[in-house]
Amino acid sequence: MAISLDRSIVGVEFDRTVCEPVTETEIRTYSAISGDPLPPSPGGGALVAAPTFVVSVRGKKFMPPKLPNLGAAGFDAGKDIEFGEPIHPGDVLTVVSTVHDVYEKTGRSGTMAFLVLRAVITNQRGDQVAVIDQKMMFR
């Protein structure tokens, strides 16, 4: 099957979601379920979320509405996360999702197409909390 990549979708924003304020319960629940301990609060101050809490933050749309012909079967090919400012209860996070890259690789089993979706997460002060690059592989 031929895979056709349309690079015109690179850089296109497909979702912008302003989330509800983060709660202390969400932070504590994530820590308990994930096993990722809560980091010490700076100077014994307010509760701080574990850095990996950002993977629980979601936009309303996971995939762009118009995708190139990447094939029917896709799967998660990994994430790269750049951590920024810590998350505290009460923070209002905004997720802006774009298509960061599309590319092909040829392996033993044939040609594979990769779609990289980037989510930039900021808080209510405009501080960058995280950049998450989600890779999807299609055959």
Image (tube, rainbow, N blue to C red):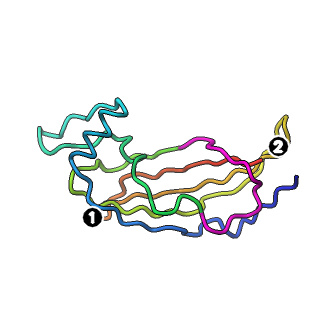
Q: Quadrant of residue 68?
A: bottom right
Q: Which residue is mark 2?
A: 106
Q: Position of residue 131 (x, y in %)?
A: 46, 52
Residue holding disc 1: 125
Q: Is residue 120 above or below residue 44?
A: below
Residue 92 place in picture, x, y as percent: 28, 61
Q: Is residue 67 left or right of residue 107?
A: left
> How many residues crowd around disc 2 within 10 Å: few (fewer than 14), some, or many (20 or more)?
few
Q: Image quarter for residue 94?
A: bottom left
The amino acid type found where label 1 is placed reads Arg
Q: Is residue 102 left or right of residue 108?
A: left
Task: Tell me: residue 28, above or below residue 14.
Answer: above
Q: Main secondary structure of the magenta part?
A: loop
The amino acid pointed to by label 2 is: Thr
Measured from the top left, where is residue 56 in percent x and y? Answer: 40, 47
10 Å neighbourhood of mark 1: few (<14), some, or many (≥20)? few
- The magenta-colored residue range is 64-79
